[in-house]
Image (cartoon, rainbow, N blue to C red):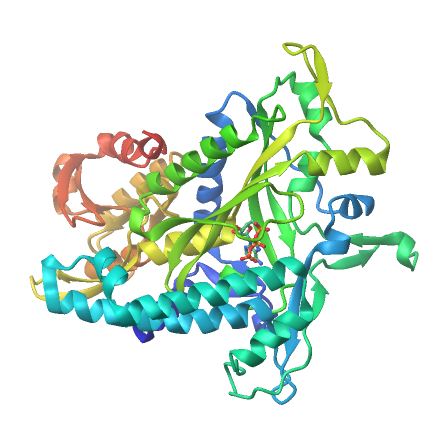
């Protein structure tokens, strides 16, 4: 656990130190749970969005994209249920004045038990070596079986009280489990109460409920209200999907874990419209398709898992999370939800406008059912960074062992694709040549020119921001127009002609390599 926390701290400080993420309004001591993307961060984030957009829109003939406004008619949020039901249960500690989500406190109780199980497993693995069978150990070790049973009981009880919105039941759980304020150890709690997560604002200068607007808490509703516009203008036939990337806002009670839980964040959502009764087939399809997308980016199977929702939202008849193993444990990265016809039906009722599709094959009109895939761009960023950041021992220029921090991002999504480095700064022939190469390559992909410090240090700087290729211009270049191309991961250096750099690098950073 301590080791995991260390890894997470290192990741957060790497993000700041190397220009990926800054705290918002830092000079005013920051704004909690709001972050700014720094120069390399924005490049990486754009590449992740591009990877998502290409796979969803470009590679599916029956998925089209939109970019709806953040502000929507206030009735949207009444129809969607957000005004009445987009709540989290919160509880205050009277001594520390700290505020928590009740479900997070109870999950934290279970995570502590889980950590004990992990410790026993790690010990056993060390003892039995290759012969160790984790599944069997979990099923037969008495202590682990008891602990797992305890976790299952607590989680089942939590699911019930959360599902029922049972505030007294939540308080009883906090008391029965003797849950204390994680920061101060105090057990002096208020009663839990519901807290709506939407940010509100005013339209123009008119005060009052009439002109109250909300910053959208999800991008999906912009898709639902445009469903018929899109269908008609693009002549799509069901089944078809609408994709969107955009900002969403939630007044999260507890801001924690860096960009995992933000108050302003970005979602990449796709709503897939299907005939009633076909939603489970498509739900299964999108579950598998989305998991493949994560794996294609190089995230290993053991860091990804499905987690079925025990507690379905008011609009869903099936829901699953794709969880990723972040440095602080498995957490939701993406949600796949079968949203039934709830949203379209409610918008139809409240707007008085028909949101139906005429199915020529069936010869009838109906309100389609919807399967949604919804992923947080920032969580995807965090997952990708946490998997890519590694500390390694590698030989330095003198052949001695040295430690490097390297960001092993898949080349197609790396912020900078190629750095051009003259071997020495004060040899004009080298810098002129290197500059000329850089000025040409920058038209093809994101490039960087760097001449400051010794070459070894420059390689380390590029490793730390994940640049997959470095081109070095040396004295041989002046003779024969060749350069060395250094590979970030293998450290191999190949000698190639200048005329071939663009072709070789372009091939290796092509997003096609991920899709294939
Ligand atoms: P959680 O249970 O973690 O609060 P959620 O179930 O409310 O998440 P959804 O409403 O399903 O999340 O939103 C879809 C996706 O949007 C999530 O899978 C997550 O990646 C992202 N997301 C949701 N809330 C936040 C947030 N506050 N900060 C960053 N990303 C978020």
Q: Nearer the viewer, residue 428 or 232?
A: 232
Q: Quadrant of residue 110?
A: bottom left
Q: Is residue 141 left or right of residue 333?
A: left
Q: Nearer the viewer, residue 68 or 237?
A: 237
Q: Specify whether residue 426 is in view.
A: no
Residue 272: x %, y % from top left: 58, 30
Q: Quadrant of the C terminus?
A: top left
Residue 357: x %, y % from top left: 71, 20
Q: Quadrant of residue 192?
A: bottom right
Q: Tell me what residue is drawn at x 27 percent, y 60 percent.
A: 139
In the displayed structure, 97 sits above or below 288; it is below
Q: Tell me what residue is drawn at x 71 percent, y 26 percent.
A: 367
Looking at the rendering, the quadrant in which ligand 1 lies is bottom right
Q: Quadrant of residue 96?
A: bottom right
Q: Tell me what residue is drawn at x 27 percent, y 62 percent.
A: 138
Residue 371: x %, y % from top left: 57, 35
Q: Tell me what residue is drawn at x 34 percent, y 33 percent.
A: 510
Tell me how many marks there are.
Answer: 0
């Amino acid at each position: 656990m301590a080791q995991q926390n260390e890894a997470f701290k290192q990741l957060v400080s790497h993000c700041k130190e190397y220009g990926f993420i800054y705290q918002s309004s830092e000079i005013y001591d920051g704004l909690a749970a709001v972050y700014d993307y720094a120069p390399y961060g924005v490049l990486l984030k754009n590449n992740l969005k591009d990877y998502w957009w290409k796979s969803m829109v470009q590679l599916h003939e029956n998925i089209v994209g939109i970019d709806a406004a953040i502000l929507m008619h206030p009735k949207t949020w009444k129809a969607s249920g957000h005004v009445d039901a987009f709540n989290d249960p919160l509880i205050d500690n009277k001594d520390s004045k700290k505020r928590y989500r009740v479900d997070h406190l109870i999950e934290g109780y279970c995570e502590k038990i889980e950590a004990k199980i992990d410790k026993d497993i790690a010990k056993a693995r060390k003892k039995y070596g290759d012969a160790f069978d984790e599944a069997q150990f979990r099923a037969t070790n008495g202590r682990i079986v008891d602990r797992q049973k305890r976790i299952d009981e607590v989680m089942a009880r939590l699911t019930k009280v959360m599902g029922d919105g049972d505030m007294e039941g939540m308080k009883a759980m906090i008391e029965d489990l003797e849950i204390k304020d994680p920061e101060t150890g105090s057990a002096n709690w208020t009663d839990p109460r519901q807290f709506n997560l939407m940010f509100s604002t005013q339209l123009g200068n008119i005060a009052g409920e009439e002109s109250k607007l909300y910053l959208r808490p999800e991008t999906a509703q912009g898709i639902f209200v445009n469903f018929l516009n899109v269908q008609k203008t693009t002549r799509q036939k069901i089944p078809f999907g609408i994709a969107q990337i955009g900002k969403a806002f939630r007044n999260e009670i507890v801001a924690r874990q860096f960009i995992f839980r933000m108050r302003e964040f970005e979602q990449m959502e796709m709503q897939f419209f299907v005939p009633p009764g076909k939603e489970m087939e498509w739900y299964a399809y999108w579950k598998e398709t989305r998991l493949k997308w994560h794996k294609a980016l190089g995230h290993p199977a053991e860091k990804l898992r499905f987690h079925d929702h025990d507690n379905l939202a008011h609009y869903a008849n099936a829901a699953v999370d794709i969880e990723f193993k972040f440095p602080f444990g498995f957490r939701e990265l993406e949600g796949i939800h079968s949203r039934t016809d709830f949203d379209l039906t409610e918008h139809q009722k409240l707007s008085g406008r028909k949101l139906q599709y005429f199915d020529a094959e069936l010869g009838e009109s109906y309100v389609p059912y919807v399967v949604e895939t919804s992923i947080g761009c920032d969580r995807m960023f965090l997952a990708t960074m946490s998997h890519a950041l590694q500390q390694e021992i590698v030989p330095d220029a003198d052949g001695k062992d040295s430690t490097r921090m390297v960001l092993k991002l898949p080349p197609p999504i790396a912020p900078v694709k190629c750095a051009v480095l003259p071997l020495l700064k004060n040899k004009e022939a080298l810098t002129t040549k290197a500059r000329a190469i850089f000025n040409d390559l920058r038209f093809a992909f994101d490039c960087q020119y760097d001449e400051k410090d010794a070459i070894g240090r420059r390689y380390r700087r590029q490793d730390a921001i994940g640049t997959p290729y470095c081109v070095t211009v040396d004295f041989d270049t002046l003779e024969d127009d060749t350069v060395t191309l250094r590979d970030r991961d293998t450290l191999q250096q190949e000698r190639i002609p200048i005329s071939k750099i663009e072709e070789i690098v372009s091939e290796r950073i092509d997003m096609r390599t991920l899709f294939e």
